[in-house]
Amino acid sequence: MPQPLSTLVIGCGISGLASAIRLQEAGYRVVIHARELPPATTSNVAAALWYPYRCAPKEKALRWSKATFDELMRQHAEGAPGVVPTTFIELFDHDAPHPWWAEAVGGVERLVGEELPPGYVVGYAATVPVVETPLYLPHLVKRFESGGGVIVARELRSLAEACAECALVINCAGLGARELAADPEVFPIRGQVVRVANPGVRRALTDDEGPRRVSYTIPRQADVILGGTALPNVWDTTPDAGTTETILRHCRALEPALARAEALEVRVGLRPGRSAVRLERERVGASVVIHNYGHGGAGFTLAWGCADDVCRLARGAD
Ligand SMILES: Cc1cc2nc3c(=O)[nH]c(=O)nc-3n(C[C@H](O)[C@H](O)[C@H](O)COP(=O)(O)OP(=O)(O)OC[C@H]3O[C@@H](n4cnc5c(N)ncnc54)[C@H](O)[C@@H]3O)c2cc1C
């Protein structure tokens, strides 16, 4: 019997976990090494609505996000915890064309007039998955470990360090790839979110360009995640009290059901920004590294499509 090929995945956010599970399913023996583990990763802070936001290039993002949409809907049908199909409306205060991502979700419905919150001219609605990170990430960890996967809390100082231990390394270090892969193209996009109790909100709303930009209300079972900010090159992860007030004011106006919403928790995360997601193979000494990082504001929206490509590239590396 041939031994399964072993793989070292760096990172235990959504990109690392999805890649590790896909490789495991393909017959690899997989170990994850990560500095932070759930619930301490950036992925834990995400809202996490299926929405290809602040990610590129569009053509690939469309393919990855469609594959992820289909996979998350399939996982929901199978009963995966924390994956909830939700009505989502992208709002505009001016007439706007159909969103570029519409075909990934099988089309969108154009809403106008009284179907929209006050102050908006057009909205595009679709049913998309919302992922509750406190439920879904532990579920993926469990799924990976019950398949024989091992997770080690460990900081790597270089790719060479990982390559000295394994012939196939998957780099899912998110923002950490800036140093790990010596890639200055990776930059933080600071996001602050406020968690409030859910008074019965069932639809997700976003206004990225209009009067309240950047604002979003993403309902989960017991709470609603309110955003937000998207500040490029800001590294500060301390919540800002003024920003919290602005988020609450904007979101109470956006979703009238939240008129009396009060903050239960405020969190800040640094999205791993990049001009384009880096998903490619590189030879480092005698090893092969597959990079999978730079997903911007869309790690949950691209994860399973990207993980499929990681697997394809890995097979080419056999
Ligand atoms: C406020 C906010 C809201 C968001 N909302 C959404 C949303 O609605 N929908 C959506 O799709 N996305 C959303 N995102 C974006 C999403 O969170 C990210 O794109 C995603 O988390 C990136 O996942 P990742 O696994 O690549 O990186 P991360 O989750 O950052 O994981 C990186 C992993 O690599 C490890 N690592 C890094 N460097 C090293 C090292 N040197 N050695 C060892 N390990 C290392 C880390 O410890 C961690 O385990 C949001 C983000 C924020 C901040």
Image (tube, rainbow, N blue to C red):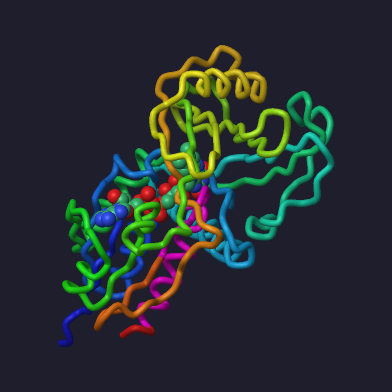
Left or right relative to 105: residue 182: left
Q: Is residue 313 magenta?
A: yes
Query: Image quadrant for the N terminus?
Result: bottom left
Q: Which residue range is magenta in the image?
A: 292-315
Query: Would you place residue 84 above or below residue 170 in this image?
Result: above
| Quarter residue 18 falls in | bottom left
Query: Would you place residue 121 above or below residue 307 in this image?
Result: above
Left or right relative to 52: residue 235: left
Q: Nearer the viewer, residue 114 or 245?
A: 245
Q: Is residue 309 magenta?
A: yes
Query: Would you place residue 216 above or below residue 262 in this image?
Result: below
Query: Would you place residue 155 above or below residue 259 in this image?
Result: below
> Which residue is painted at 47% across and 22% down in the image?
196
Left or right relative to 97: residue 58: left
> Which residue is painted at 27% across and 75% down in the image?
168
Coordinates of residue 229 in the picture (x, y in percent): 55, 34
Number of numbered labels in the structure image: 0
What is the magenta segment's predominant secondary structure?
helix
User: Is any part of residue 13 visible from this angle?
Assistant: no
Coordinates of residue 109 in the picture (x, y in percent): 75, 46
Q: Nearer the viewer, residue 242 or 113?
A: 242
